[in-house]
Image (spheres, rainbow, N blue to C red):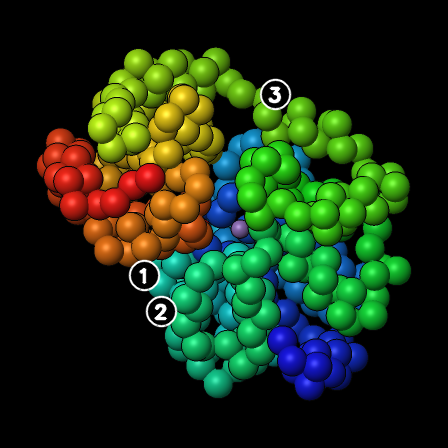
């Protein structure tokens, strides 16, 4: 945002407003952490915010403060649409195009055209729907951007352990626990500030990563068994069929993070994880890479998706087998090094 934008947003937030805070479909740690971090900040400033997520968030994030107040658009379409209609301001966090909220919520958001939209996001190639855009791919997480946003409002002093807990969560999950190249000295300095403020950082890591169900471990075991390696292309991939997933009694979030195992092998720089979702009639694909291979570009070109250079997603309307076949075929004319 330009200085002029910052001043305009400051002015907007100077008096109590009805505010909707929205995230992308299948909200992750960064989407939930940033929206709830912003929610607590806006409450503290005397506003009337509501967080609306397109569909349910995973169980492993349900401990975040105020998740019980979050509206799930898919389950409460009428009341959530009313909140959007009545809002003075709509924040769109951790996504770069309204289509990322799914068909139904996208429609409801498009109907609010003319309203003040504020985008805070770190994905590439953002659409141009927001009046105020704080979009920067240099940031490792939207949570880090929310910290900056609050700082730009000259209100860092308002950040308390509740907000910091939410924001720390997204910083940790989107940086792979401070591992990915987007992690900077500033990322660590912000985390340090939050720890000095009194958040229980060790407990947050445990809540996020040592909190799996037995089912999830069985799903992980099957995904590891299914793993295939294509050494000539420095590529690996794995998959889960609908039957495998439901056979283990999966719940939301159970497949989260599994894609990263494909990159944990020596000399592998590109990996994909295919999950069959018969309810939605699609194959959801997660892509990850190490180094220069740009999976955002790859996902856009071949699988109707996008994301970041080293972490992207996509989808396919083909069968699981046909999708994997197509994936293998693309490798022949994809330069991976
Ligand atoms: P994941 O594999 O964890 O679902 O997604 C990795 C990254 O890619 C996330 O930042 C996510 O927002 C982005 N992403 C996932 N699926 C899609 C998609 O279909 N389109 C776009 N543009 N981005 C996606
Ligand atoms: Mn993010």
Q: Residue furthest front?
A: 337
Few, some or many residues within 10 Å of mark 3 (<14, 14–19, 20+): few
Residue 77 shows in this picture = no
| Location of the N terminus (image quadrant) | bottom right
Q: Mark 2 or 3, which is nearer the eye?
A: 3
Q: Are marks 2 and 1 in contact (CB under 8 Å)?
A: yes
Give whichever of discs 2 and 3 has the lower sequence position. 2
Instruction: Kindly identify which numbered label has been placed on residue 210.
Output: 3
Q: Are marks 1 and 3 in contact (CB under 8 Å)?
A: no
- Near mark 2 (Cα within 10 A), the count class, few <14, some 14-19 or many ≥20, is some
The residue under the point 36% across, 63% down is: 99
Secondary structure under tag 3 reads: loop
Residue shown at 63%/37% (left/top)? 178
Residue 277 makes an appearance in the image: yes
Compared to residue 58, the image places residue 54 above or below, namely: below
Q: Nearer the viewer, residue 118 or 147?
A: 147
The residue labelled by disc 2 is: 107
The answer to which of marks 1 and 3 sits earlier in the sequence is: 1
Element at label 1: helix
Percent x, y of residue 258? 42, 27
Q: Position of residue 146 (x, y in %)?
A: 67, 59
Image-based side of 222 in relation to 303, left or right = right
Q: Which residue is mark 1?
A: 103
Residue 324 image-quadrant placement: top left
**SS for dot 2:** helix
Question: CA gap, disc 1 to disc 3?
Answer: 34 Å
């Amino acid at each position: 945002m330009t200085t002029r934008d910052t001043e305009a947003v400051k002015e907007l937030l100077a008096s109590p407003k009805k505010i909707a805070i929205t995230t992308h479909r299948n909200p992750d740690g960064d989407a939930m952490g940033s929206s709830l971090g912003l929610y607590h900040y806006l409450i503290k400033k005397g506003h009337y915010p509501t967080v609306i997520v397109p569909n349910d968030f995973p169980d492993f994030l349900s401990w975040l403060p105020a998740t019980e107040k979050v509206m799930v658009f898919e389950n409460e379409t009428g009341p959530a649409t009313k909140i959007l209609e009545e809002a003075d301001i709509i924040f769109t966090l951790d996504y770069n195009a309204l289509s990322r909220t799914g068909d139904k919520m996208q429609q409801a958001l498009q109907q609010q055209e003319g309203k003040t939209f504020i985008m805070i996001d770190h994905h590439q190639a953002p659409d141009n729907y927001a009046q105020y855009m704080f979009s920067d791919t240099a940031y490792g997480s939207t949570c880090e951007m929310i910290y900056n946003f609050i700082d730009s409002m000259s209100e860092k002093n308002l950040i308390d352990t509740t907000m910091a807990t939410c924001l720390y969560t997204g910083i940790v999950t989107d940086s792979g626990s401070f591992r990915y190249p987007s992690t900077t000295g500033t990322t660590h300095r912000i985390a340090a500030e939050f720890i000095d403020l009194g958040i229980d950082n060790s407990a947050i890591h445990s809540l996020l990563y040592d909190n799996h169900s037995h089912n999830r471990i069985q799903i992980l075991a099957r995904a590891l068994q299914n793993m295939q390696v294509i050494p000539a292309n420095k590529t690996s991939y794995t998959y889960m069929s609908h039957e495998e997933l439901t056979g283990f009694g999966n719940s939301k979030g159970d497949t989260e993070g599994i894609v990263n195992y494909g990159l944990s092998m020596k000399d592998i720089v590109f990996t994909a994880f295919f999950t069959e979702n018969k309810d939605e009639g699609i194959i959801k694909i997660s892509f990850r890479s190490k180094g220069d291979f740009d999976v955002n570009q790859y996902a856009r070109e071949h699988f109707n998706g996008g994301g970041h250079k080293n972490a992207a997603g996509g989808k396919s309307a083909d069968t699981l087998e046909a999708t994997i076949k197509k994936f293998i075929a693309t490798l022949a004319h994809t330069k991976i090094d």
